[in-house]
């Protein structure tokens, strides 16, 4: 098992007023992320002389606004014709954890909630939820 990390570049998604992912650009965005993952995974697999990869384990924070189903679809499509074709993408969703800088409250809230439920302070420090990390990959023996 190999462990690595891919850090996100910029904003990962937009939402309409109902909170649903905007589909016009979502697939293109997730496809770009999938292609970045495949580039990294192919390089790592080559370093380990792996003829193929059986599974990829990704930690994905809720605050990234990356849709896991769209990413899984884009990953499957982008893997075609590569040594990753047929590998499983296992996504572990990490909930958003926030801290209020004024009163040190810690908890979870949706991105639309910007006010501390304890003291009313506007804004939070994000402790968890922005992750887009390739945690490991399974290489068959």
Image (tube, rainbow, N blue to C red):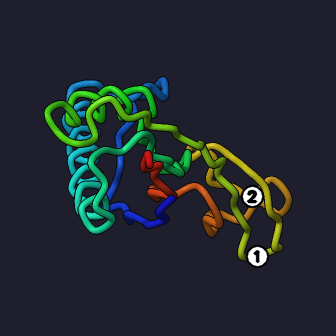
Among the two numbered marks 2 and 1 on one chain, the one whose residue lies closer to the N terminus: 1
Residue plotted at (28% across, 24% down): 23
Judged left or right of residue 13, residue 58 is: right
Q: Nearer the viewer, residue 106 or 81?
A: 81
In which image quadrant can residue 20 be found? Answer: top left
Q: Nearer the viewer, residue 23 or 104?
A: 23
**Residue 125 screen position, x and y as percent:** 63, 69
Labels 2 & 1 near each other (Cβ < 8 A): yes
User: What secondary structure is found at the residue carrying circle 2?
Assistant: loop
- Residue that badge 2 annotates: 116
**Residue 48 screen position, x and y as percent:** 33, 65
Judged left or right of residue 30, residue 125 is: right
Judged left or right of residue 25, residue 98 is: right
Residue plotted at (62% across, 53% down): 114
- Marks 2 and 1 sit apart, C-alpha to C-alpha, by 9 Å
Q: Nearer the viewer, residue 104 or 11?
A: 11
Q: Nearer the viewer, residue 92 or 50?
A: 50
**Residue 67 screen position, x and y as percent:** 42, 34
50 relative to 80, above or below: below
53 relative to 102, above or below: above
Q: Which mark is residue 102?
A: 1
**Residue 87 screen position, x and y as percent:** 37, 35
């Amino acid at each position: 098992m190999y462990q690595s990390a891919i850090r996100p570049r910029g904003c990962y998604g937009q939402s309409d007023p109902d909170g649903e992912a905007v589909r016009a650009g979502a697939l293109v965005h997730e496809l770009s992320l999938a292609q970045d993952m495949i580039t990294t995974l192919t390089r790592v697999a080559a370093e380990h002389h792996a003829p193929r990869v059986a599974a990829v384990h990704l930690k994905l924070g809720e605050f990234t606004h990356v849709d896991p189903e769209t990413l899984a679809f884009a990953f499957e499509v982008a893997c075609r014709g590569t040594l990753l074709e047929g590998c499983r993408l296992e996504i572990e969703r990490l909930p958003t954890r926030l801290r209020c800088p004024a009163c040190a409250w810690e908890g979870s809230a949706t991105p639309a909630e910007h006010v501390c439920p304890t003291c009313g302070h506007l804004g939070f420090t994000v402790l968890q939820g922005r992750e887009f990390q390739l945690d490991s990959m399974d290489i068959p023996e």
